[in-house]
Each structure stands twice: as structure tokens, then as C-alpha cells.
Image (spheres, coloured by chain):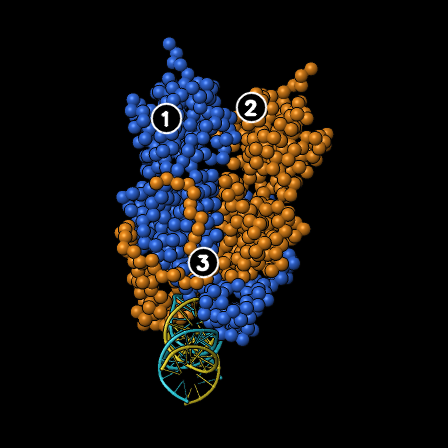
Chain colours: A blue, B orange, C yellow, D cyan
Amino acid sequence: MSKTQPPASSSFVPSGGRPAGKLAKASDTGGRTKPAKRVSIREIARQAGVSTATVSMVLNDNPKITQATREKVRKVIDKAGYQPNRIAQSLSGKYTRVLGVLLPTLRHALADPYFGELISGICDRAARLGHKVTLESAKPDFIREKKHLELFDRRFVDGVLCIGFNDRHVFLKDFAKAGHPMIVVNNQFDPWGVDQVVCDYRSGTDQVMTYLQQLGHEKIGLIHGSPDVFTSRVITEVFQHRAPHLDGSFLEDGHFTEERGIEAAAALLDRHPDLTAIFAGNDKMALGAMRYLALRGIKVPEQMSVVGFDDIPYSQFVTPALTTVHLPFYEAGDLACERLIQRIRGKDERINETLSTHLVLRESTGIAPRPRD
Amino acid sequence: MSKTQPPASSSFVPSGGRPAGKLAKASDTGGRTKPAKRVSIREIARQAGVSTATVSMVLNDNPKITQATREKVRKVIDKAGYQPNRIAQSLSGKYTRVLGVLLPTLRHALADPYFGELISGICDRAARLGHKVTLESAKPDFIREKKHLELFDRRFVDGVLCIGFNDRHVFLKDFAKAGHPMIVVNNQFDPWGVDQVVCDYRSGTDQVMTYLQQLGHEKIGLIHGSPDVFTSRVITEVFQHRAPHLDGSFLEDGHFTEERGIEAAAALLDRHPDLTAIFAGNDKMALGAMRYLALRGIKVPEQMSVVGFDDIPYSQFVTPALTTVHLPFYEAGDLACERLIQRIRGKDERINETLSTHLVLRESTGIAPRPRD
DNA sequence: TTGAATCTGTTAACCAATAGAGTAAACTGT
DNA sequence: ACAGTTTACTCTATTGGTTAACAGATTCAA
């Protein structure tokens, strides 16, 4: 009765074709009733004694309709509980009112609270503007089969929001090339001239460096994310600018993950046992570093300060709670969604917005320990 | 240049109506080209010298078409890069090939790695079966406005998967009542006779209790989730069955969150200072408990063992790493999605599947400390 | 040689809405 | 009173597919 592996096979043809008829079988249907016959605009028109065009105009608040007719039609609509068929509206009209959210491999992405916030912002705004949101994972074969362009060619979506990509994902250029509305959220591809909404990583990093230096930290190690990602490069760049005395041996790639964060912290401390602070390009790597320090018995913040980036929920529940930079992901998703819809509606202006960030002080940072003599 | 609050206003009518014309404006379009004219099945038919019906049949691998015709049409299709318009297919056919994922408030939900896994499983399976997935958040006003039924009435979706709800969400009955395909993932509403795919919480809890008791723990506190949720009740029930000597004062509601997990741990320890183990109904509450223990200076696992439930990624990166029950969320989403699609296709059989769970031993548990004399 | 069956494709209705052209009635001005 | 305009709707083409009904050509049996 218990199993983990779902059956691999499936009897459905992947595209087209009507269903192969109901598999009639007298069994428990869970008290299910047949779906009521859907009423169409024709039926409403007939009952109200007007044409379908009139009903359509009533639905769309067209001012050409008199108050009397409007009320008469509305009454029939309400009584029948009629709702216009969205498929038909899309076919007839110019828009599907569906937005696509494109992510690299989903599983990795959604496990990250970072994406959750972004997507929530997008979905909430989309819903308020009468749009639906579909999730797409841009796996390698998805791109190889040009499925990202299919989204538009087959009229699945009106526009896409791209999250979590890097410079090597050159397929992102395809959208602009084909003239399809696309916006990059919390990322930047300047040379490609792509629409974007980004958090201010520059200012966030600057605040961290100012803070750490005020606490007297000089030997600071940076665990950065992959340099393919614009935001990682910004952090590294500002870090080096603010701490010119620290050479490349104070940098280590943590690949955005806890595991690699652990390894990076180990590498940094091997090279520089006199480090007094570790700054990580995201909270996951910072948590990895804290994990390593705990295993080594190094006390945070007494012996080592740790700063993260992102302010994911967990950062406040670990011990010690993590000092980090808060990024307004929800707001970024919200704004990107709104701007994308404007773009779809025909607004012809490059989108390039920046959202402010701020440092959140918690328990993982403290005054730099005095160097041992 | 930097702002966090996006403009609140929006100039779009929320439903119906054609766009108010392009806002022509000579400006930077980012090297954007006009979208190419979409080719229709009629155009393909014309170029191939056949009827649209024939093209349609070729697309749908209808055996009535000869190999020769098939190849002739295929060649034209390939040359033109033609892809059938999905909107038109949906209007004409019976299915939209879109599934809805219904969640309580999105922001809360997606922040949870738990949902990320489930949704990944759903999306991956859906994609393999040629379906799209849309995200819907069932906020109170969403339900009040009957938007959950609108999903079907307006033909937005063919079926819905419901995640993260509890017994008070009675609107879930509406789907079955209206005869719409719906499946509940990792939850159970037995009296409602609803389709469901659940992880085996009973066995998981049993494994935890066996393990803790083998380690010599007798005074065990349970931080459970809200009793409105079926899975929480299962854990509590099995806990009480396996530890009949522990009365209600060993139970505390942690509301599934870290914050309340902290409070619950505090309450349990206040009442029972001689507690040697805390078992939490999910990892977030367990992490909250660990946080509280750290603040109190109580050593885990030397002085106190902690066990969680879910096996979210973070549980292995905290210190000490959390012993917990692994739930196959990805597989649950995958299986639920497959079953739902079968149901949509007409399979008339109640779905009620259980996926097995297993205990993952890590560092937060150990032999029960001997009671102080 | 005829009648029926089979094969392969076409014709046309249909899905449910929107939009632009068309029209009858009411209104305006002289 | 009559042409011209406005108003308030209706008619119908259109969107891009699917499919039931049909039809011409060929094959086969009686």
C-alpha cells in the first residue's frame, strides 16, 4: 500500500488528439456530479432578447449600450452565473493574459526561499491585473527544442519573466530578437539591452563593508557566488574596491550553496588563519560558513563575524542569527510584473529599475578580535 | 534612482476590452524587432495543396493519412516552422491542458521548501505529459468571489491540485460538488471523499518514537502543527499511542513556524524541565526549538535530543544537523499530477495513494541523559 | 457487371468570443 | 417635411483549430 516510485509509463499522446473516450467503469466516484452545461454568450443573448454583440459590449462596459439594456442583460448574466470563456476571449482578442515565469531547473529554484518571494510578488500583482502565471523550467533540452519561443508561437503566454539565469544562458537574447516581451528579474544583462528590475547589490555590499570596517575588521574573506552571475560580480567588485589591501586569496567561490559555502570557508581559513570576518554573497553560503565554523569550534561572533546577503527567513532562526542584507524580492517581482504588462500593452520604453537594499544587524557580527601577539 | 515601493495605480481594466491602442513613442526599443506574422493551419494547407483538415490530421498522427501526404505536409510545416495555436486547439477541443496549483497565501507557501519540492514534482510531470501549470493563491477574497470555480467555468484549467489546506477550508468540497477534477496533495479529507496523494505520516512518526525510545528517552515533548491539519493529527495520535504515559502537558502547538516553535519549546521546558527529547511536527518548528535550546545554553544532543519532520534542505546545514523524517514531496507532486491527468481524461476511480517515509539520522539525537539524582 | 466496402481526403459546421460594417429609429436643423 | 446626424443596437466575418459527414477512387466479392 505504500510506494515511492510512481509508474513511469503514461498512455497519453503528448499533443493533440481527442481523448480516447471515457473509460466507463462502475465505481466510487466520490459523490461527483457531472459538470453543468456551460452557458455561452449566445445563450445569454437569447434569454435577454439581444444579440451576442450586445452582451459582449455589456461585459466590456462599452458606453454605447443604454442603461436599460445594460441592466436587462446584467440580470440575465447574474441569474445564469455566466462567465465569459477565457479561451474564446484569447482567440478572438490579442492577448492571452497569461505570463510565463521562466526558471532554470525548477527543483533547485523553488527550494530557494529567494525564488518564493519573487514568484509571490509576481503572482500577486498578476492576479490583481487579471493575469494568470505559468511556471516553466528552462532545462537544457527545453532550450534545445526551442520551447521558450514556442511559449509565444503557440500563444501560451503574452510575456515572460526570467529568474535565476546567468550570462551563459544566451538563449535569453532570443526573446528580444523575436520581439517578445521579456523581463529579467534581479539580474542584469546590460550588453544585451534587456528589460530588467534589479535590487541594489552595489549599495548593499557597500553597507556591509562600511559596517565591518567600523567594527575594526581588516582581514575579511569573501565567499562569492558564480562569476557568471551579474550580481555576484557586483559584490566582488565593490568588495575589492572597498578593501584594496585584500588580494585574490581572500576570495573563494561558494557556488551559491551551503555545501560549497562550507568548503569555501575552509579554504579561506586555511589560507588566512587570521581572518576575523567572512562575508558571503548569499545567506545559504553564509549558513554553510557558520556550519563550518561551528564544526571547527570557532565562536561567532566572538572570534569571527559572518555576514550574509538576501535575508532569507532562516537567517533569523539560526544561532547566532545572521547579520545580512535585506533584498526586497517580493517588491522586485511585483514591480517586474507590472512593468512587463505595461510592455505587453505596447509601452515602448526600455525597463531598467533598481530597488534599494539595507543591512539587517543581527547576532553574527561583532567587534573584530584583537590580533594575537 | 532607487525605490522600493512600486506605483500602486494601474491603468488596465481588469477584465475584457481590447487594449487602448499602442502608445506610440519613438524611443529605445532595445533592438527589438516586430514579432513575425504567425502562420496558421490554413497557410500550411494552402502551401501543401491540401485542406486544413488534412494538416490537422497530420499533426495529430491520424492513421487515415497516407505516408506520402504526411511527408508532403510535414515538409511544409517544418519549412514554415509552424506550431499549432494552443488557444485555438483548446477552444475547439475538450481540454485546455492547463492544471492549476491552488495554495493558501502564496507568499507564506512558497517560502517553504516543502512546497517547492511538491510544485517541482507537479511541474515536471505536467511538462512531460504536455500540460502547463498555473499558480493560484486561495486568499479569503479569492474564495469569497468564487474564483476557484471560475477557474473551471471560464476554462482556465482542466483540473486543480490543492496544497497546504486544512479542514476549515470547506470550499474544497465545491470542486467535487461541481464535478471538477481536483486532487489534494499531502493532505487528507477522508469524510469528503476527495482524491488524494499523501505521505505516510503514521509510519514516519512510528519510526521516530521507536528510535527515541531505543535511545532511552521517556520524557518526550511534542511540538505539533495545527490540529486543523490532518497530518498533524496523525502525528499527535501516533505519538500518544506510542507514549501513553505522557499526558496533554507534553504537547504544544507550534503552528508550523519557527517563531512559534521557539515559544512551544519554552512552554514545554517550563512545564517539564526534565524533558530529554523534543519531537516537532515539522523541521521549521524543530529549528525553532533548537534555536531556543541554544539561547538557553542547553546542548543538543548531549542534554536534549531534537527530531524534526519533512527533511527540508536546511535541516542538514544547521548545527547540529537535524535528525528528521524524510518525506518524498517531489514524488508526491509527481504522482498526484499524473493521477489528476488520468482523472481528467475520464478515469472514474477514487484516488487514494500513500507514499512511504523514512527516518534520517543526523546529529541532533543521542542517548537520553541519565536523570539527575 | 454490379453492389458494397475500403481508403483517403474534402467540405463545412462548430467551439465562444470580439469588432467593424450595416441599419432602423430617433433626433436635429432649416 | 426632409436630409443629415446620432444613437443603439444587429449582422457577420474573424480568430485557428477539430471533426462529423460526405465523396471520389479503388478494391473486392458475388
Note whether residue A337 is visible: yes
Give A104 or A245, whichever is nearer the viewer.
Answer: A245
Label 2 resides on the chain identified as: B
Choose between D1 and B285: the one closer to the eye. Answer: D1
Residue B13's disc number: 3
Query: Which mark, by number, is residue B295?
Result: 2
10 Å crowding of disc 2: few (<14), some (14-19), many (20+)? few
**In the image, residue A184 lies at what x, y percent?**
36, 45
Measured as percent of width and height from the top left, residue A302 is found at 46, 18
Both on one chain, marks 1 and 2? no
Number of other residues with Cα within 10 Å of mark 3, as a class: few under 14, some 14 to 19, many 20 or more: few
**Label 1 – label 3 distance at C-alpha:** 47 Å
Mark 1 or 2, closer to the camera = 1
Quadrant housing residue B277? top right
Residue at the spot of label 1:
A210
Give the residue type that dot 1 points to.
Answer: Thr
Report x, y in % for residue B67.
36, 67
> Residue at 28% of width from left, 46% of height from top?
A192
> What chain letter is assigned to the residue under label 3?
B
Report the side of A314 relative to B240 (left or right).
left
* Amino acid, disc 3: Val
For residue B23, above or below residue B258 = below
**Going 33% across and 64% down the picture, which residue do you hit?**
B39
Q: CA distance from mark 1 to mark 2?
A: 29 Å
Tell me the subunit letter for badge 1: A
Amino acid type, residue under disc 2 in the picture: Leu
Q: Of helix, strand and loop, which one carries label 1?
A: helix
Q: Helix, strand, or loop for circle 2?
A: helix
Please name the residue shown 54% across and 46% down the image: B105
